[in-house]
Amino acid sequence: MKRAAFFPLVGLGTLLTLTCTELARASGVTPVVAEVPAVEGGLYHVDDLRTQVVFSVSCLSVSWYHGMFSGVSGSLQLDSAHPEHSHVALQLPLHSLTTTSGSVTQTLWDEGWLDVRKYPDATFVSTQVVSDGPSQARVAGRLTLHGVTRPVTLRVHFVGAGKNPMDQDYTVGFEAHGTIQRSAFGIRNAMSAVGDDVKLTLTGVFEKSPSDTLR
């Protein structure tokens, strides 16, 4: 899979980090967060159990309807010293879509919507990163969905980093937000009832094994 520039990474603010760490320790919980404003670089892979993509779309102009995708795969090559040189590529299985209604989920799988038999996956490959501060960035990339590739820009926030106490894997986490127009990807069914704008929220968790951390 192709790789391109992705999430810039600089540390959390020292005061916020130490405060969260002390609160966690007081509760008897081992914090999974970097205690200094430094994050390990290297090759990471997606933690598919904790990585989620949530979409929100206007329904009849009176409410927002939400759904979620899971099973994301991909990798992140992180350069902490020069975040603009980092690389990421993600793949999302569209059949992982879930909603609160089985019939709605089935409809969205079918032709006229995602058409998951013909287009089983969506992919995102980043192309540029622009820092907006110590833990914020705008990340541009190419999103391929429903057989169409369009440029998309995500607003990315660095959440935290540290060693997972359960499996000892070093882990970094981000949250990203963006909006796409479904019509731009050829999904134009029921435009009078379902909004064109689709809001996306990505919770991205990436980890590497202890052997990778030592490299």
Image (cartoon, rainbow, N blue to C red):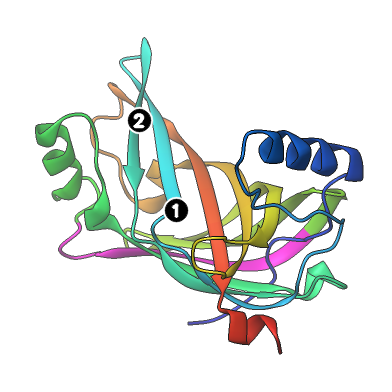
* Marks 1, 2: nearer the viewer: 1
Q: Amino acid at mark 2?
A: His
- The residue sitting at 34% across, 42% down in the picture is 68
* Direction from residue 6 to residue 105 in the image, left or right: left
Residue 121 in the magenta stretch? The answer is yes
* Direction from residue 134 to residue 92 in the image, left or right: left
Question: Which residue is identified by label 1?
Answer: 50
Give residue 56's quadrant in the image: top left
Which residues make up the magenta segment?
116-129
Mark nearer the N terminus (1 vs 2): 1
Q: Secondary structure at mark 2?
A: strand
Give residue 37's quadrant in the image: bottom right
Q: Secondary structure at mark 1?
A: loop
Image x and y of residue 117, in percent? 15, 63
Crowdedness near tag 1: few (<14), some (14–19) or many (≥20) residues, C-alpha within 10 Å: some
The vertical placement of 54 against 93, above or below, is above
Q: Amino acid at mark 1?
A: Arg
Question: Which residue is identified by label 2?
Answer: 66
Q: Which of the two residues, 128 or 172, is positioned nearer the viewer here?
A: 172
Q: Which of the two residues, 163 or 55, is positioned nearer the viewer here?
A: 163
Q: Tell me which secondary structure the magenta stretch mostly adopts.
A: strand
The vertical placement of 66 against 51, above or below, is above
- The residue sitting at 13% across, 40% down in the picture is 107
Crowdedness near tag 2: few (<14), some (14–19) or many (≥20) residues, C-alpha within 10 Å: some
- The residue sitting at 72% across, 33% down in the picture is 23
